[in-house]
Amino acid sequence: MKVLSNVKRFGSPPATLTMKISLGTDHAGFHYKEKVKELLGQLGHEVKDFGTFSDEPVDYPVFIRPAAEAVVKGECDRGIVFGGSGNGEAIAANKVPGVRAALAWEPWIARGARRWNDANVLALSLKRLAPDVAVEVVQAFLDTTESDPDEWANIERLRELEG
């Protein structure tokens, strides 16, 4: 499968193309990660799962950082991280230069994060989302392929802040 991260425009490739998606989670988000991984496979996307691989307590940055790094390195097109609140996971992912992780709990927030911020990692809260809504949020994140041209200057400024 060709990794599509080298697209030379804002936004990701059209949703009709398959993508490679990195996943990372804490123990609280493990079951949601498994459900989303199944959905991604059904949609034809390739998944790189960085764990955790059970609901036993873990230190989540160990699993979130490699999932975020895979996006920046171009090994994956986008990433999805899961946690109890999702906040710690978003913070951990955003520590990786080049990551723009957004916490979303409704589809319109995931779409906006892609369009207005060119977010490349989605953070999900299992305590905030029912499983069916989590799937809708993921679908919105993946289906939103183009950044809003009116936001390109802001997106470029975000990239400049990365150092």
Image (cartoon, rainbow, N blue to C red):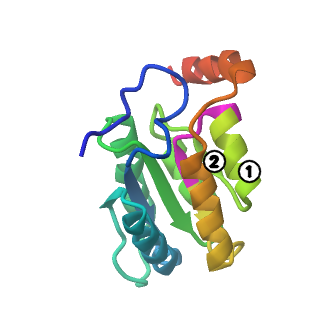
State the count of labels: 2
- Is residue 86 visible in this depiction of the protein? no
Instruction: Using the image, determine if residue 161 lies above or below residue 30.
Output: above
Q: Nearer the viewer, residue 64 or 138?
A: 138
Task: Tell me, yes or no, whether the two marked residues, 1 and 2, touch with CB atoms within 8 Å.
Answer: yes
Amino acid bearing label 2 = Ala
- x 48%, y 81%: residue: 31
Q: Which mark is residue 56?
A: none
Q: Position of residue 124 (x, y in %)?
A: 60, 63
- x 33%, y 63%: residue: 49
Amino acid bearing label 1 = Ile
Q: Position of residue 4 (x, y in %)?
A: 35, 35
Residue at the disc numbered 1: 109
SS at mark 2? strand
Q: Nearer the viewer, residue 18 or 84?
A: 18
Residue 86 shown in magenta = no
Q: Position of residue 136 (x, y in %)?
A: 64, 65
- Is residue 40 visible in this depiction of the protein? yes
Q: Nearer the viewer, mark 1 or mark 2?
A: 1
Q: Position of residue 47 (x, y in %)?
A: 33, 59
Instruction: Give the spatial CA distance, label 1 vs label 2.
Output: 9 Å
Residue at the disc numbered 2: 102
SS at mark 1? helix
Stretch in magenta: 116-122
